[in-house]
Image: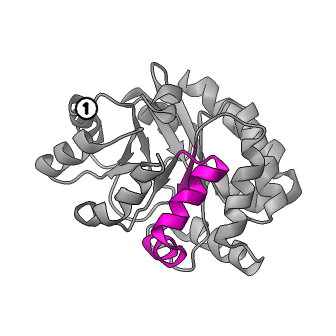
């Protein structure tokens, strides 16, 4: 069992996302500490990219703002290296094919290991083409997290059985970002994934309010929040660490 599965096993878990360097590196670092203090079980850190095509408006804008402020891959590595000295929860990067390819597969995953990252999510990497990258992730012990969208049963079964760390259930098709309502069948979708894997299944994409958090946590092993947290950071500036801390404490109480 790897560190991610160990951290998420036998409980309702919470994964929180931030975009590295949004709005500044200093605030990102402080938010991470507060997320962990509030009980976040795994931190997902987005490496800013100019074309984050799986993201909705909120995270897309956070990416652009971070890039304009000088955020680069190397600085995202520096951020993880710094926080890793103080936090023990698993850290997973979210990025896209292009930045990893441009950095160099071997060097990228070697650096992930050196700074203390545990896994990676690459939303635009087709499952059938991921071996080209996965061989380097495996070389350095970095878990490639599998996104499982609500598609055909045959494909869901294949993705679920291959997943390591945790299975990232995509609540509904489309871009990341808050949703007013989830599609019919999401409960059956989560149940089917659970039947096809032995690792934790966590659900994300579009979860925002307390009612949705409770609904989604009841059909999975936990939830993943991205845009909701990025929204708080965007609106709160220097007060973001404390605002995020309070928000996550309430979530932990809701899903406990």
**In which image quadrant can residue 26 be found?**
bottom right
**In which image quadrant can residue 203 be found?**
top left
For label 1, count other residues whose C-alpha is less than 10 Å away and answer few (under 14), some (14-19) or many (20+): some
Element marked by disc 1: helix
Residue wearing tag 1? 191
User: From the viewer's perspective, is 134 left or right of 55?
Assistant: left
In the rendered image, residue 96 lying in the magenta stretch gets the answer yes
Q: Is residue 226 visible?
A: no
Q: Position of residue 6 (x, y in %)?
A: 49, 26
**Picture residue at 54% right of the left edge, 64% below the top:** 108
Which residue sits furthest left?
154
Q: Position of residue 32 (x, y in %)?
A: 73, 46
Image height check: is 202 above or below 97? above
Magenta span of residues: 91-118
**Picture residue at 34% right of the left edge, 54% below the top:** 172
In the rendered image, residue 221 lying in the magenta stretch gets the answer no
């Amino acid at each position: 069992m790897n560190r991610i599965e160990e951290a998420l096993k036998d409980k309702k878990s919470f994964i929180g996302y931030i975009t590295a360097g949004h709005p500044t590196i200093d605030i990102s670092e402080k938010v991470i500490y507060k997320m962990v203090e509030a009980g976040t079980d795994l931190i997902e850190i987005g490496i800013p990219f100019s074309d984050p095509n799986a993201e909705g408006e909120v995270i897309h804008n956070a990416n652009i703002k971070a890039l304009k402020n000088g955020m680069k891959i190397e600085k995202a590595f520096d951020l993880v290296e710094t926080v890793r000295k103080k936090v023990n929860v698993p850290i997973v990067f979210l990025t896209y094919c292009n930045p990893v390819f441009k950095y160099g597969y071997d060097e990228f995953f070697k650096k992930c290991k050196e700074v203390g990252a545990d896994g990676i999510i690459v939303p635009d990497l087709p499952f059938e083409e991921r071996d080209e990258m996965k061989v380097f992730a495996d070389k350095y012990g970095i878990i490639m997290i599998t996104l499982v969208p609500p598609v055909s049963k045959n494909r869901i079964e294949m993705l679920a059985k291959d997943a390591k760390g945790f299975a990232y259930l995509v609540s509904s098709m489309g871009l990341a970002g808050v949703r007013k309502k989830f599609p019919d069948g999401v409960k059956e979708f989560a149940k089917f994934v659970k039947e096809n894997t032995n690792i934790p299944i966590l659900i994300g994409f579009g979860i925002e309010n307390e009612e949705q958090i409770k609904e989604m946590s009841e059909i999975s092993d936990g939830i993943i929040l991205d845009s909701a947290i990025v929204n708080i950071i965007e609106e709160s500036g220097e007060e973001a660490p404390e605002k995020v801390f309070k928000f996550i404490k309430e979530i932990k109480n809701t899903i406990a």
